[in-house]
Image (spheres, grey):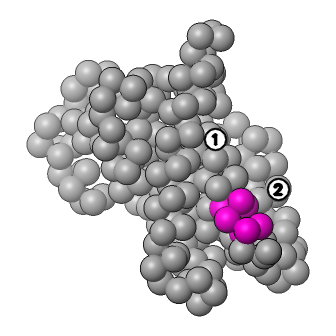
Amino acid sequence: AFLLQALVGQVAGGGEGGLSAAVRWGALWPSGVVRGRIWQPFTYLLMHASLSHLFSNLFFLWMFGSPVEELLGRRNLIRLYLVGGVGAGLLAVVAAALALPLGGGGVLFPWDVPTIGASGACFAVVAVYSTAWPDRKINLLLVPLVFEARWILPLEFLVEFGINFGGVSHAAHLFGAAIGLAFGLLLRR
């Protein structure tokens, strides 16, 4: 899907606002979904901004998804991934639509800004991991820091909201994590 996105971007070239046809049609645009582009809450999961974006999502999915797959089974992991990703996209659309009459959702719930990537789905998987094994130790690769899995989401959001990362869909991350936490809490019961 990433190669197809790049190919469509090269063939179609930049269109309105310099965006490729792939981003215009496949990314999640709350305004587009409301106008009938109902495929976007799924297709945005297949798109990524760069190879590093793609690989970071794949790394998190491998690191946390492998044990979650052992716990839930392959089909339920895929269901969790899709419900987390598509659900995060749909909730982001609803939040942006609700914020629009109040003057817009700003950076958190933008109306006319595209969202791409599978981070919402990955956050759902990480949230299930952190609820299934809250006492497991997490060792970061590049930073000498060890902490329990229960702290991974609070630390991620502290970093994400503490450092101004441009081009990050905070809504997809928050809603994906919320869906995963709900699923994880139901699983614990």
Q: Amino acid at mark 2?
A: Pro
Q: Please, which residue is most extreme toward the left here?
A: 11
Rendered position, 185 above or below 2: below
The residue located at (82%, 56%) in the rendering is: 154
Residue 80, image quadrant: bottom right
- Can residue 175 be seen at all in this image of the molecule? yes
Q: Residues within 10 Å of mark 1 (few under 14, many from 20)?
A: many
The residue located at (79%, 80%) in the rendering is: 133
The quarter of the picture where the C terminus appears is bottom right
**Mark nearer the N terminus (1 vs 2):** 2
Q: Position of residue 171 (x, y in %)?
A: 62, 40
Depth order, front residue of 82/110 = 82
Horizontal side, residue 92 vs residue 40: left or right: right
Q: Main secondary structure of the magenta part?
A: helix
Q: Residues within 10 Å of mark 2 (few under 14, many from 20)?
A: few
Indicate yes or no whether the magenta region holds residue 123. no
Residue, disc 1: 170
Depth order, front residue of 162/136 = 136
| Residue extent of the magenta highlight | 180-186
Residue, disc 2: 154
Depth order, front residue of 76/52 = 76
The residue located at (63%, 77%) in the rendering is: 64
Q: Please, which residue is most extreme toward the front here?
A: 189
**Label placed on residue 74:** none
The residue located at (59%, 90%) in the rendering is: 70
